[in-house]
Amino acid sequence: MPKPIVAIVGRPNVGKSTIFNRIVGERVSIVEDIPGVTRDRIYSSAEWLNYDFNIIDTGGIDIGDEPFLAQIKSQAEIAIDEADVIIFMTNGRDGVTPADEEVAKILYRSKKSVVLAVNKIDNPEMREQIYDFYALGFGEPFPISGTHGIGLGDLLDAAAEHFPKEGEEEYGDEVIKFSLIGRPNVGKSSLVNAMLGEERVIVSDLAGTTRDAIDTKLVRDDQEYVIIDTAGMRKKGKVYESTEKYSVLRALKAIERSDVVLVVLNAEEGIIEQDKRIAGYAHEAGKAVVIVVNKWDTVEKDEKTMREFEEQIREHFLFLSYAPIVFLSAKTKKRTHKLLPVVDMVSESHSQRVPTTVINDVIMDAVAMNPTPTHNGSRLKIFYATQVAIQPPTFVVFVNDPELMHFSYERFLENKLREAFGFEGTPIKIFARPRK
């Protein structure tokens, strides 16, 4: 099931970004003592005890007419709409302000689970200041200090109580789930319809028509599929989000639920930076990937055009060197029949498991061909390797000192594993561990 989503919401300058960075464990949000500095929602993954969840930092909600406040308010409202749990952040030094009360009204209307945090309670003598916050109507306020990291454990415990309970898997293991991601208007919905052979998904020339992820079942040659169509990922600031209610996070949810991700490009427009950012989400999630070049019918071609376009893709998407490329036209349905066999292939690669003895034969042959590197007089020694997971295939290599495993040698081992076992369309993870 998708990870739970926590949104940190509050008026400007109550310390939301500081708390976000504390929970995530790195400096992701810009922290500055100026109201409104966080103008966009910022997403990250986080862990607490046995929970993995996504967390959203938002711009502050305010009722004034300062620059950006309308946009900031719409950003925060979308984050509220997406979240399973909301951390309502207030400032203990200021007490309850009219702006806090306005935020509370918005949260009442959302009918979401809310955990109230009172920030900047930096020492025990200040704890009496939290009692006024009971008046906001969200139960017990949790005193915290973003500066000193105090009280975050209790706050996250309270948030985790509201996480959705894990249920049964929506679909069986034999069903291949794949999503289509890409910029708006690259033809994702048209491609779904071409595969289905019917107008199941609304298709429009207006960018951003598909607003939510849609599951569509498909059976072909006795293989069951679930197609997860998603709202197009739009570059921040391109469209006023309160109108479209569009969100990257919805696409991220679809990626999490998928076995295979189709990264759809528009052949008419070529490759832009946003395409690479979108594809990066699928790669970082460890999903099998197919790059789909749609609207190929609109491109003037000669015998070199496809090869040249493929070279451009390989140049721009170096991190997806393992992903096969399919050129097609959803509109004319030309070459669309080639897509599902490729989905089958990369799904099989994503779940492929290799016996330990065979892995070690390949690794030892690789070491004999290209001896391990040395650093400061010490040579890396590889004792043995084993596969510890699938989806994606994950390998642990036991060595004398993990610090001696240079990324270039790790890439060499990955290439040798791919040469031996294929793994087309799936990322591979390799971890060096000391032998005990």
Image (spheres, grey):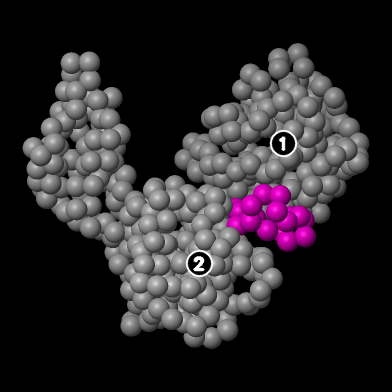
As for residue 341 lying within the magenta part, the answer is no
Q: Is residue 277 something that shows in the picture?
A: yes
Across and down, in percent, residue 169 comes to 45, 63
**Sequence order check: which comes first, mark 2 or mark 1?**
1
Residue flagged by tag 2: what amino acid is it? Answer: Ala
Between residues 418 and 218, which one lies in front from this camera angle? 418
Residue 241 within the magenta-colored segment of the rendering: yes
Magenta span dominant secondary structure:
loop
Query: Residue at image x 63%, y 77%?
Result: 202
| In the depicted structure, whether residue 401 falls above or below residue 28 | above
Is residue 166 or residue 188 the one in the foreground? Answer: 188
Question: Which amino acid type is marked by label 1?
Answer: Thr
Q: Quadrant of the C terminus?
A: top left
Q: Position of residue 177 (x, y in %)?
A: 43, 67
Give the residue pinned by disc 1: 38
Choose between 9 and 28: the one closer to the eye.
Answer: 28
Horizontal and vertical percent position of residue 343: 36, 68
The percent position of residue 144, horizontal first and vertical second, equals: 68, 25
| Tag 2 secondary structure | loop
Q: Can you identify the residue that label 2 sits on? A: 267
Question: Which residue is depicted at the point 51% across and 38% down?
Answer: 47
- Quadrant in the rendering for residue 147: top right
The image quadrant that residue 185 belongs to is bottom right
The magenta span reads 233-250
Give above or below for 204 relative to 95.
below
In the image: residue 193, left or right of residue 370: right
Residue at the image position 78 percent from the left and 27 percent from the top: 34
Foreground label between 2 and 1:
2
**Residue under the image location 71 percent in, 17 percent down:** 122
Marks 2 and 1, how far apart at CA: 35 Å
